[in-house]
Image (cartoon, rainbow, N blue to C red):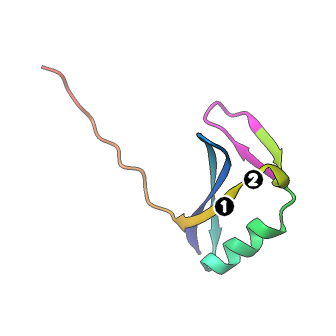
C-alpha cells in the first residue's frame, strides 16, 4: 500500500496532517469524508481530537520521506 498525507485546514494558520496507508487517493478521500471526528497525535505525543464540522478544507497528497540534513559549524 502507498502512503498518503491528509491535511486538515481548521482556521487561518492552523493545519494538521496525518499520514495514512491506502491503495489510492480515492480510498483516502472516502476515509476522510466518512469521519465525523478526526484525531491525530502531535509531536509531543498528545492525542488531539476535533469535530469534522470545524474543518474548512481537506487536502490529500502523496507522502514523501522527510529529508534530514546535518550541519556542522566550523
**Quadrant of residue 23 within the rendered picture:** bottom right
Q: Name the residue under label 1.
A: 58
Left or right for 2, reference 36? left
Highlighted magenta segment, given as a residue range: 38-47
**Given the current orientation, which residue lies at the most extreme left position?**
74
| Secondary structure beneath label 1 | strand
Q: Nearer the viewer, residue 57 or 7?
A: 57
| Secondary structure beneath label 2 | loop
Quadrant of the snapshot with the N terminus = bottom right
Q: Mark 2 points at which residue?
A: 55
Q: Which of 45 and 9 is in front in this view?
A: 9
Q: Which of 2 and 58 is in front in this view?
A: 58
Q: In this view, does 16 lie above or below 24?
A: above
Q: How crowded is mark 1: few (under 14 residues within 10 Å), some or many (20 or more)?
A: some
- Residue lying at 78% horizontally and 48% vertically, measured from the top left: 39
- Asked if marks 1 and 2 touch (Cβ < 8 Å), the reply is yes
Q: Give x and y (percent) for residue 12.
A: 62, 42
Q: Give x and y (percent) for residue 9.
A: 65, 51
- Residue lying at 69% horizontally and 77% vertically, measured from the top left: 27
Left or right for 32, reference 70? right
Q: In this view, does 67 lie above or below 43?
A: below
CA separation in Å, label 1 and label 2: 7 Å
- Residue lying at 68% horizontally and 34% vertically, measured from the top left: 45
**Given the current orientation, which residue lies at the most extreme top position?**
74
Q: Give x and y (percent) for residue 10.
A: 70, 47
- Residue lying at 63% horizontally and 67% vertically, measured from the top left: 21
Quadrant of the snapshot with the C terminus = top left
**Quadrant of residue 53 within the rendered picture:** bottom right
Amino acid at each position: 500500500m502507498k502512503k498518503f498525507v491528509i491535511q486538515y485546514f481548521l482556521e487561518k494558520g492552523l493545519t494538521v496532517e496525518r499520514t495514512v496507508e491506502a491503495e489510492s487517493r480515492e480510498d483516502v478521500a472516502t476515509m476522510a469524508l466518512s469521519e465525523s471526528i478526526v484525531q491525530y497525535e502531535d509531536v509531543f505525543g498528545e492525542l488531539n481530537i476535533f469535530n469534522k464540522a470545524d474543518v474548512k478544507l481537506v487536502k490529500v497528497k502523496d507522502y514523501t520521506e522527510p529529508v534530514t540534513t546535518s550541519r556542522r559549524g566550523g
